[in-house]
Amino acid sequence: MVDVFTDRALAGNPLAVVMNTCGLSTEEMQAIAREFNLSETSFVERRAAAVEQAEGVRVRIFTTQEELPLPAIPRWARPAC
């Protein structure tokens, strides 16, 4: 969980970020987002090294009800690994 729209911990808006989601289905991601019960949950999907170098990782964003189309606000809100 990270705090966005702030420069200090425990402030701003909480955002769940799930790293390395390889193997999770869309249905599983939706269930996880419902479990977190936040306005958005971001799932970072790794891709082949050449694709990541050219295009970056894939980020999918879910509310408790549905997947949001990109671009969406939290797409940049992923912590450094």
Image (cartoon, rainbow, N blue to C red):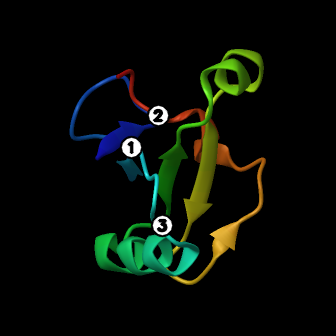
Query: Residue at 49% across / 77% down in the picture?
Result: 30
Give the quarter of the figure containing the C terminus.
top left
| Residue 54 sits in quarter | top right
- Find disc 2 in the rendering and name its residue: 78
Of the numbered discs 2 and 1, the one sitting upstream in the chain is: 1
What percent of the width, then of the height, locates residue 64?
48, 79
Number of other residues with Cα within 10 Å of mark 3, as a class: few under 14, some 14 to 19, many 20 or more: some
Of the numbered discs 1 and 3, the one sitting upstream in the chain is: 1
Residue 73 versus residue 49: which sits nearer the camera?
49
Q: Is residue 37 left or right of residue 40?
A: left
Front disc: 1 or 3: 1
- Find disc 3 in the rendering and name its residue: 39
Number of other residues with Cα within 10 Å of mark 1, as a class: few under 14, some 14 to 19, many 20 or more: some
Residue type at numbered disc 1: Met
Q: Is residue 31 left or right of residue 57?
A: left
Q: Secondary structure at mark 2?
A: loop
